[in-house]
Amino acid sequence: MKKTLLLSILALSLQQLSAQNFTRRDSLHGGLRFERNCFDVQHYDLNIKINPDERSIVGYNDITFNVVEPTSKIQLDLFDNMHVDSIVWNDQKLKYERDYDAVFISFPKELAKDTNDKVRFYYSGKPKVAKNAPWDGGFVFKKDSNDKHFVAVAVQGTGASLWYPVKDSQTDEPNNGATIKVAVPNGLMNVSNGRFKGSEDLKNGYTRWNWEVKNPINNYTITVNIADYVHIEDKMDNLDLDYYVLRENEEKAKNHFDADVKPMMECFQAKFGRYPFWEDGYKLVETPYLGMEHQSAVAYGNKYRKGYLGRDLSGTGEGMNFDFIIIHETGHEWFGNSVTSKDIADMWIHESFTTYSETVFVECMKGYDAAMKYINGQSQNVQNDKPIIGQYGVNNEGSGDMYYKGALLLNTLRHVVNNDEKWWDIILKYSETFRKQIIDTKTVVDFFNKETGRNLTPIFEQYLQYTTIPKLEFKKYKKRFQYRWITNVPNFEMPVDIMIEGKKMRLDATNEWQKSKEVIPNLNDIEVLTNHFFIKVNQ
C-alpha cells in the first residue's frame, strides 16, 4: 500500500451524514474501520475465467497482506450480487459474514503484527452490467463488426468490488503490484494492466492471458478487455507504447495514435516528470465505451476522432486539434494513478489536474494564447451546483465541477503566482513530490502554500467548498474607484490583474473596500483580465 500522508482532512458530523441520506452500505464502502486499517495489501493475484455468452465470472483472488495491527478479523469487499464460494487460509476454510458488499473474514487465531499472510478468495457470479459506462460502473458486453465478443469493464466511483474481491478503498494499493490472469474463449484475447507474460491454451475451449503489474495500482484501474485484438507495437525513448485495437481498425489506429501519443508524452514528461509507470509500459486499449484511466492500459473508445466524439467541449475550436480521450485519460497516469486521493470525496485531485493537463497539452502544441482560449472556453461547462469536495467516509464524490471549475482554479493560481517559470517548477515538483503516493486536500493546499510563499488556503476553500466563485466589486469614489472581493470565505485575499487605458495593473484585493490610486472617468474603463482569473465582476 502507498502510505497515506495524512490521516484525514475533515471529520463529517452526524448532521451532515443524516442530511445527505447516506446508508450503512455507503459507510461500509467508504469508511475506514479497524477491520480495514489493520492490514496493508501487498499483492493481488487474480485468476479468473470470463464467459461472455453467460456474462459470468468464476475464479479467485490471492490477497497477500501485511498485518499492521494484531487482528482476528479483516474486511474485504465483493458486491452482494456476487457469490462467495469460499475463503481459504493455510488450507483452512475461513468463516465470514456479509454486510451488504462488505465481507468480514474471521481467522481461527489472532494474526501477529508485522507478519505477512495470504487468503485465497474464491468467488463466482454475473457482475453488474453498466447502463452507460463509464459514467455508471459495470461490464459492457458488445460485439464487433465480425460478431465477435467485445467486452470491457469500468468501475471508478462504483467500486472494484463490483467484479472481484478486493480491499475496495483508495487508501490501500498493493506495494508489489498485481498479476491478472484471465481465461477467455479461444479466438479472443484479454488485455489487462502491465506487461504481457504469456498465454496458455487450457484445452477446454479457453485460453488464459497473463499480465503483471510491477507498480502499486489503484484497485478501480485494474481491468479486463476482451476482444479479437490486433497488437501494434511502438517505442519512444525506450518506453514501450503498445496499442490493442479491433482487427477492423488496425490501419486507422496506426495513423491516429501516432499523431497524438508521442507529442503528448513529450509534453507531459516535460511538465509533469517521467512517465510514472515505466516498468509496466504504456498501452491504449480499444474499448466498447468512451474511455477510462486504467493504469498502464488506458481504455480508448473515442472512435478515432479528434475532439470528444467529434466535438469540442471547450466550444472554441481548439479542442478539435487532438483526440480528447487520449490526452485526458493519459493525463490521469500522473494525476489519479500516480498522485492519488485518499477518499473519493477528494477526486478533484484527480480530475482538476487532469483536465488542466488538456490545457497544458494545447499550450505545448500551440502556445499560451491558444491554451487560454481553450481553458476559458471550458467555463461554459461549469454548473456551480454543489461543492467540488464531497462527503468523507461514505464513498461520495463532489460536483462534476471538479473537472472544469477545478482546472480554472489552477489557471487562476497560475496567474496569482504571476511567474510562469515558477509556476511550471511548482507543477513539476508537485507531480514528483507525491509520485505514487496517496494524499488529501490539505496536503495539496499546504504544498502550494509553501511553494508559492502565499496563503492560498482561502482561495482553495472558496472554489472547492462553495458553489459561488469570487466576485470582484467596484464602485466609483470621487475621480477614482474602490474595489473588494465578495466571497463566502472570510478574510479572502487574492490579487487580480486589470487593464486601464492599455496599462496593466495588479490589485491586491481583499473583502474590505480599498481605494485605487488611478484616476478614471468611468468604471467601464476598467477591463478585468477574466481570462486569467475565474471570477465574476460587478462594476
Image (tube, grey):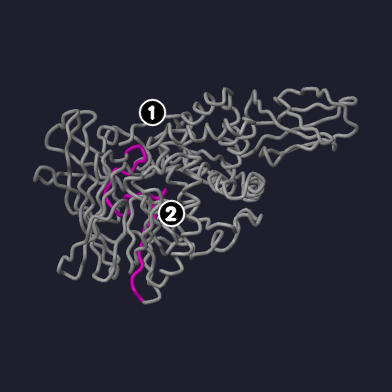
Residue 151 magenta = yes
Please report the residue visible at 43 percent of the width from the left and 69 percent of the height from the top: 251
Q: Is residue 271 left or right of residue 280?
A: right
Between 33 and 230, the residue placed more toward the observer is 230
Cβ–Cβ under 8 Å for marks 1 and 2? no
Which of the image's four quarters has the C terminus?
top right
Q: Which callout, 1 or 2, points at the residue further toward the start of the chain?
A: 1
Q: Which residue is mark 2?
A: 292
x and y percent of residue 374 in the render? 63, 49
Find the magenta span and give its range: 147-172
Q: Which residue is mark 1?
A: 7
Label 1 crowd (10 A; few <14 / some 14-19 / many >=20): few
- Disc 1 versus disc 2: distance between alpha carbons? 28 Å
Q: Is residue 382 left or right of residue 166?
A: right
Kind of residue at badge 2:
Met
Q: Is residue 388 left or right of residue 144?
A: right
Residue 457 vertical position relative to residue 340 in the rendered view, above or below: above
Which of the image's four quarters has the N terminus?
top left
